Amino acid sequence: SSKNLVKLSICESQLNPRAFNKDDFPTGSKGLFQYTEPTFLAFAKELGITNPDIWNPYQQIQLTAYLFSQNKSYLWTCARKHGIHGIK
């Protein structure tokens, strides 16, 4: 549900679209859902997002909703830790 996306974003970034964690390998995690560049770009390509921009909160929401619909919520530590599951 959309509530799960909000819960995940609160856990990952405190709802801050400019959040940055420099310690995540290899490029740091960025944005609402704390994507690394390689992960964001790979899944954006899979979804068909044109002109992917890791700092675009709308693209992060779109991509995360897609990944949840594909039962890939396990990609986030916060989701695993707090039992946040895909959109049903």
Image: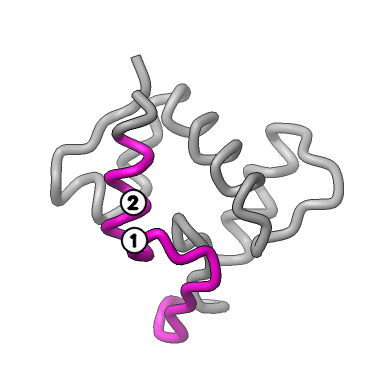
What secondary structure is found at the residue carrying circle 2? Answer: loop
- First in sequence, mark 2 or 1: give its number: 1
Q: Residue 10 location, x and y as percent?
A: 30, 56
- Looking at the image, which residue is at 62% across and 61% down? 38
- Which image quarter is the N terminus in? top left
Residue under label 1: 12
State which region is magenta.
4-25
* Way the structure is coloured: one colour
What secondary structure is found at the residue carrying circle 1? Answer: helix
Q: Residue 74 location, x and y as percent?
A: 31, 41
Residue, far left: 82
Residue under label 2: 76
> Residue 80 lies in magenta, yes or no?
no
- Looking at the image, which residue is at 42% across and 77% down? 24
Q: Residue 82 location, x and y as percent?
A: 14, 46
Left-right relation of 23 to 10: right
The quadrant in which residue 55 appears is bottom right
